[in-house]
Image (cartoon, rainbow, N blue to C red):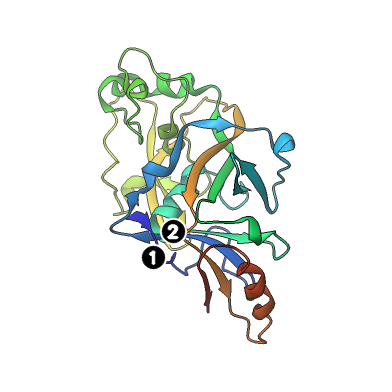
Amino acid sequence: MGISTVRSAARSRGCGTRKQGAIYAECGLSIWGRPIEHFLVDPPRVSDAGALGLSSIGVKLVEVNGVWHIFDIVGSEHYPNVADFIEEVRVLGASRRLARTLDFSKLTSDSKLVLLHRRAQIDNAGEYFDAMGAWMPTGWHCPKHVPEHESVRLPPIMCAGLWWVDVEAGAIPAHITRHITPSMCRMPDESRLTAVARQMPGFIYNAWARPDGIHPQYRLAIFMVLPITNLAVIRASDGSHAEAQRSAEQARLPVEVCDD
């Protein structure tokens, strides 16, 4: 599925279900939209949370070249793997909660949802490529098809494709599930990678477990930038969502009141 103006799906996510009276920035799905890989930042852009005024809870409006964007650190508690969030967006679209106190008047159709993760940058990426062994020259796939990332002579310093080669937390051997994605392929015997199936709320995706013996060196980085198709206000049974709706309508973005 690609990204377009259709609303994101109202299903259980890694961070749970949506709250009554809350406001969410959405990026919906459409078969006419662009593939999720289009929105990945590859290589990821290392960022300083302190300099940007970011915290692990909540979002921050940051102005870039005269446009205000929503910067949001995706929590490792709910999405320990970077690929967890990307695959959820692929299936459900994006939905990120915003505080009612946010200055919504700064948001326009040019505003973006800038997503960061504390495991997005892998400084010792070379160890992962070494673990791929004989598969690396012919089987490596960069999701953005960056030419220098698919060189058979010199592996890249970092590539977004490694997010699917660094999966842990709840991953089970892929052979016990029938959910096999087109991106999965057989590793040669020389490889130290193991195919796994990662269970998320509502769906499963396939990837690779981190190779044995590797101790990852992570840094916070921007890994995805999405358009904001609309703001969603979740209807409250007592009508208290009306105040949230008024706040959201200060933005120059479509606002929808929905049940979940």
* Marks 2 and 1, the one that precedes in the sequence: 1
Residue 15 horizontal/vertical position (percent): 58, 59
From the viewer's side, name the closer residue of 97 and 174.
97
One can see residue 73 in this view: no
Q: Residue at x 58, y 41 (%)?
A: 117
From the viewer's side, name the closer residue of 210 and 33.
33
Residue 249: quarter of image: bottom right
Residue 183 horizontal/vertical position (percent): 29, 41
Q: Label 2: state its secondary structure.
A: loop
Q: Residue at x 70, y 66 (%)?
A: 100
Q: Which mark is residue 168?
A: none
Q: Residue at x 59, y 26 (%)?
A: 217
- Find disc 1 in the rendering and name its residue: 6
Please determine whether, in this image, residue 208 is positioned above or below residue 84: above
From the viewer's side, name the closer residue of 46 and 213.
46
How far apart in space, not on screen, are marks 2 and 1 (Cα)?
9 Å
